[in-house]
Image (cartoon, rainbow, N blue to C red):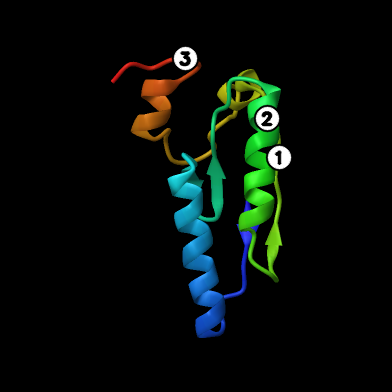
Amino acid sequence: MFDLPSETKREMRDYRIFRKSLLENGFVMLQYSIYYRSLPNRSSLKKYESILKRLVPPGGNVRLLYVSETQFQDMILLAGSRSRQEEIVGANRLVVI
């Protein structure tokens, strides 16, 4: 989850580059400024942690939270509905398209 400044053209450019990098690295937008990615193990987690550290623009607030698949699936929706992708992928580690 992140909150980046977007007052100047430079900050807006940094925001777009960061968001685009998240999508290129397989992250999916859960809500505005909240992205997630399912990973198979802790070594993959460390890999993406280092990638994100390199991508974070100066300023703003960027947080990384580790949640198990079970915890993610047990998330309670108070309003709205699960995205189509969340319904398809669910708790499956491997999805063949």
The quadrant of the picture occupied by the C terminus is: top left
Q: Is residue 61 above or below residue 79?
A: below
Q: From this viewpoint, is residue 18 visible?
A: yes
Q: Please report whichever mark, 2 or 3, sits nearer to the chain's N-terminal start.
A: 2
Q: From this viewpoint, is residue 31 visible?
A: no
User: Label 1 vs label 3: CA separation?
Assistant: 20 Å
Q: Please report whichever mark, 1 or 3, sits nearer to the chain's N-terminal start.
A: 1
> Toward which corner of the image does residue 78 lie, by quadrant?
top right
- Residue 18 position, x and y percent, is 53, 60
Q: Which secondary structure, mark 3?
A: loop
Q: Is residue 55 above or below residue 41?
A: below
Q: Residue at x 47, y 66 (%)?
A: 16
- Residue 22 position, x and y percent, is 51, 49
The residue under label 2 is: 67
- Residue type at mark 2 is Val
Task: Assess whether mark 2 and mark 1 are in contact (beta carbons under 8 angstroms).
Answer: yes
Q: Residue at x 66, y 54 (%)?
A: 54
Q: Residue at x 34, y 31 (%)?
A: 84
Q: Nearer the viewer, residue 4 or 21?
A: 21
- Residue 31 position, x and y percent, is 50, 48
Question: Left or right: 63 with respect to 13?
Answer: right
Q: Which secondary structure, mark 1?
A: loop
- Residue 45 position, x and y percent, is 66, 31
User: Label 2 vs label 3: CA separation?
Assistant: 15 Å
- Residue type at mark 3 is Asn
**Residue 92 marker:** 3
Q: Is residue 45 above or below residue 35?
A: above
User: Label 1 vs label 2: CA separation?
Assistant: 6 Å
The residue under label 1 is: 65
Q: Which secondary structure, mark 2?
A: loop
